[in-house]
Amino acid sequence: MTEVDLGQVAAEESLRVERRSGVELAFDIEPDVLVEGSRPHLGRLVTNLVGNAARHATGRVTVQVVREEGRAVLRVRDDGPGIPPEHREAVFDRFTRLDEARARDAGGAGLGLPIARDIAHLHGGTLVAEDGGLVATFPALPAHPPTARR
């Protein structure tokens, strides 16, 4: 495990995700939101969350990384129909695909969100579905102090 800039990982990996034509990707990334972790694993988490959002968005996916109360917070939101409250835990079960998603797209096998949650847990974090999107939280490392210029 090493120090990872969550915002940098989120921005770089989000740009790699394939999106349908007309789906815009927006960012709201606070600098120096650092976590201890595996960059490849955190990259996979971001890819899975953004890929899921891109499949369900009607026109926009927003990726946000902020520091809140000593936690590093990654929010991935889309303007699609959202996950109904009664299914917000079930989407993290392996091979689960909601009927609405099955009818709308070819999608995946229902493994992306469970894998993302496993990665969050391995990093001492959480991953939950909320109104408008998915939220991952991790213990944040202290930000580096600004370097004095001479």
Image (cartoon, helix red, strand yellow):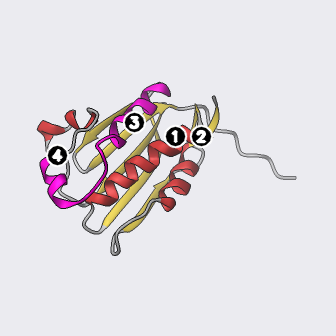
CB under 8 Å between discs 4 and 1:
no
What whole-number distance in Å separates the C-alpha atoms at marks 2 and 3? Answer: 15 Å
Specify the principal SS of the magenta part.
Answer: helix
Is 118 left, or right, of 86 in this rendering?
A: right
What whole-number distance in Å separates the C-alpha atoms at marks 3 and 4? Answer: 17 Å
Which circle's residue, 4 or 1, is located before the other in the chain?
A: 1
Judging from the image, what secondary structure is the residue with disc 1 in? Answer: helix
Q: Amino acid at mark 3?
A: Ile
Which residue does the numbered mark 1 point to in the structure image? 42
What whole-number distance in Å separates the C-alpha atoms at marks 1 and 3? Answer: 11 Å
Which circle's residue, 3 or 4, is located before the other in the chain?
A: 4
Per the image, is 61 magenta?
no
Other residues around mark 1 within 10 Å, as few (<14) / some (14–19) / many (≥20):
many
Q: Residue at x 47, y 32 (%)?
A: 138
Q: Please provide percent x and percent y for residue 130.
A: 24, 42
Q: Amino acid at mark 1?
A: Leu
Which residue does the numbered mark 2 point to in the structure image? 39
Residue 115 image label: 3
CB under 8 Å between discs 1 and 2:
yes
Which residue does the numbered mark 4 point to in the structure image? 98
Which circle's residue, 1 or 3, is located before the other in the chain?
A: 1
Q: Please provide percent x and percent y for residue 11.
A: 52, 56
Judging from the image, what secondary structure is the residue with disc 2 in? Answer: helix
Q: Which residues are magenta?
A: 98-124
Picture layout, residue 63 above or below residue 123: below
Q: Amino acid at mark 2?
A: Arg
147, 4: nearer the viewer = 4
Which circle's residue, 2 or 3, is located before the other in the chain?
A: 2
